[in-house]
Image: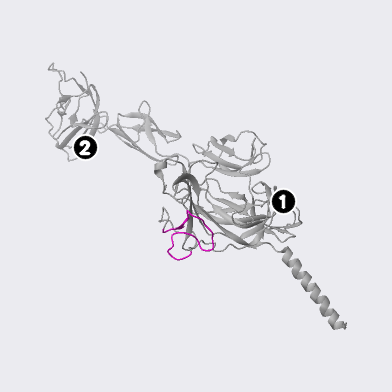
Amino acid sequence: MSGNKRFNYIFLLQLIFSLICTAADAQQVVNLKNPSLDPETPGSSIKAAQWDSDAPYPVVGPDFTFDSSKPASEGRYFIELFSLYTRNSYATPPGKLEFWSHAIGQQLDETLYAGRTYEVSFDLKTSTYDPYPNLHRPFYGSMVIMGSAAKGGPEVRLYASGRFYHNEWKRYTAVFTPPADIDYFRITAVSVDGDTANVVTDIDNLSPITETLKMEITTGKSCPEGKEGFVRVVIPDAVDTYTYLWMPGNYTTAEVKGLAPGIYHLTVRGASGAVVKKDVEVAAYDLTATKAVTDVSCSGKGDGAIVITAVGGQPPYTYQLEGAPEVASGTFNNMVPGNYHIVVKDQLCTTTVRADITEPSLLTLEQVQTRAVTCNSASDGQIILAASGGTPPYRYGVQSGIPQPDSVIRLLEAGTYQYTVTDAHACMVSGEAVITKESRACAVFVPTAFSPNGDGQNDVFRIKLQDAITDYRLAVYGRWGQLVYETRDAGASWNGRYKEAPLPAGSYVWTMTYTDSKGQLMQQQGTIMLIL
């Protein structure tokens, strides 16, 4: 044999050997015929093309199903399978009361081999319409995959979905390892645990049957900012050799440690050609901490507080305020204004919380004004205060008086007063003010009390003119500030009634305005005591 012929012969043997090895090592993928379950003819109500089914036949959806409002999950059609306990017109004898189920099946183009693991995916839903409500039985969806060497032969159960109740399409994946070689693949709707429920199962969009690997994946958590996580893959009863690839990281072992939280893409390849790809999550420990901050109440004080509450993770927790030792409590009192970082630790992880304590600006008095008592017998002096800073709202008052929201303190006699302003946090600023009195007779004399008891003595409240006045107005107010009497007649009197009803004894505030004989606009204020 010449050199060239010998070389070509050896090359041909190598090529044949390579093709045989490649075929032997390929991952098995078995395509199902008509996976979208289209009918034999458009508009047909029964039987999916290239799928076997026996009477009573399943129906083609959506047009001929109990709930025709739901479209197919993929394409135009799907199959609806029943499992019912009713009279079967196809039984022998006809009308026999029995439990029967729809089913579809097909001869596979390739054998599913015993001991290998396969997976197939499909969409399932059940109907919202109970086809036999008068039977008063439970109602749900359920799907079972059976396998056999040939149609009609002894079957083994490969997969069972269990009960489901959703009436929207949901993707399922069946993973199974046949105990014997399978050449016939059958799908049916059956009740679960032998009950007599009405079962309605809609199925669509089957994937190819793909050889896969049965894997057990274990993960370990990591701290959110750490690398304590791990992943581990175990293939039970492994009879092959496998390679592993984890990305990111390019790890090539079945177990990887020192991982940060995240999603890792795993590819496992068997020497026989089976390939499995999975996304594996390394979760983070759920150690979290929340804060509650109480700001400083008054400028210059140190009464702020921080309360840290830790949850999740692995208790017990410790808390460390920067520069201080670790403590078991997350409450920090007597804090001055500032920005703080608190480190929270459990048995493995740490997290840091920032807390900012602020203080209000200094409560100050921008302005203090006084108004003198206008005449000898009046009590209409005023202190007018203007505050800023602190935490509004403010309250204003003088010694022996009730603090008020009005910044003008009225009805004061001549004298020296200690005034105070407090804010919403009880911060205070105080001072002293002097109310003077103008030394002149009042144009109007106002009594301080009257007793409307009908004894003819001092029964009404009436002013006494000591000068000629014009533009007169007198108003009397009750304890809640409501107007109880008003007049523009200087000769009128008040009998202590409001809308003809007698008022209770007590102090009433009055205000009076008028123009005196010198043309000056005057204002007097005071109180009148109603005595019964």
Is residue 41 on the magenta stretch?
yes
Provide the residue designation for mark 1: 235
Q: How busy is the neighbourhood of tag 1: few (under 14 within 10 Å), some, or many (20 plus)?
A: some
Q: Is residue 485 above or below residue 219?
A: above
Residue 473 appears left or right of 215: left
Q: Give the camera-side residue of 352 and 162.
A: 162
The C terminus - image quarter: top left
Q: Is residue 263 visible?
A: no
**Residue under numbered circle 2:** 522
Residue at the outermost top position: 455
**Magenta segment:** 40-63
Gap between marks 1 and 2, in whole Å? 103 Å
Q: Is residue 355 left or right of residue 436?
A: right
Q: Nearer the viewer, residue 468 or 280?
A: 280
Image coordinates of residue 431 in percent, x first then y, are 42, 33
| Membership of 48 in magenta stretch | yes
First in residue order: circle 1 vs circle 2: 1
* Residue in view at x 20 percent, y 40 percent: 521
Query: Which residue type does callout 1 highlight?
Result: Ile
- The answer, for residue 466, to whether it is visible in the render is yes
Question: Is 249 positioned to the left or the right of 513 in the image?
Answer: right
At numbered mark 1, what does the secondary structure look like: helix, strand or loop?
loop
Q: Quadrant of residue 469?
A: top left
Q: Secondary structure at mark 2?
A: strand
Question: Residue at the location (20% across, 33% down)?
Answer: 475
x, y percent for residue 457: 14, 17
